Image (tube, helix red, strand yellow):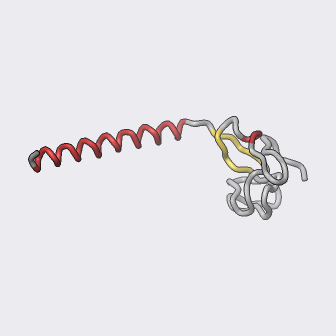
Amino acid sequence: MSKIETTIGIAAAVTCALGIATAAHAEDASKKMEKCFGVALAGQNDCAAGPGTTCAGTATQDYQGNAWKLVPAGTCTEIKTPEHMGSLEPIKM
């Protein structure tokens, strides 16, 4: 096999890998997300949590009922924490 054939083969493999990675990223970006309350750890909530927080990363306790995290749609209420299940609405504590 010549050096040119080897180079072309490597270039084709890299191009194919990049195409697969791009397609996977596009698929991930199209997935629906939803707010899930009560599942974020302290300091790891997403933006615009409830009273006592100002924005992303401001939850003061683990599983704070008014702090939310974005999760794939349809999975929130299946998330179990040591405190409670995830909720699509703020959890009164």
Counting from the top left corner in percent of width and height, residue 70 is at 67, 46
Q: Residue furthest right?
A: 93
Residue for point 9% across, 47% down: 2
Counting from the top left corner in percent of width and height, residue 83 is at 84, 53
Quadrant of res 9: top left
Counting from the top left corner in percent of width and height, residue 73 is at 67, 37
Q: Count all numbered tags in the image, as a single digit.
A: 0
Near-viewer residue (53 or 27): 27
Residue for point 82% across, 61% down: 52
Residue for point 74% across, 62% down: 42
Near-viewer residue (41 or 60): 41
Counting from the top left corner in percent of width and height, residue 78 is at 75, 40
Relative horizontal placement of residue 82, taking residue 75 as reference (left or right): right
Near-viewer residue (87 or 85): 85
Q: Residue furthest front?
A: 1
Residue for point 66% across, 44% down: 71
Location of the N terminus (image quadrant): top left
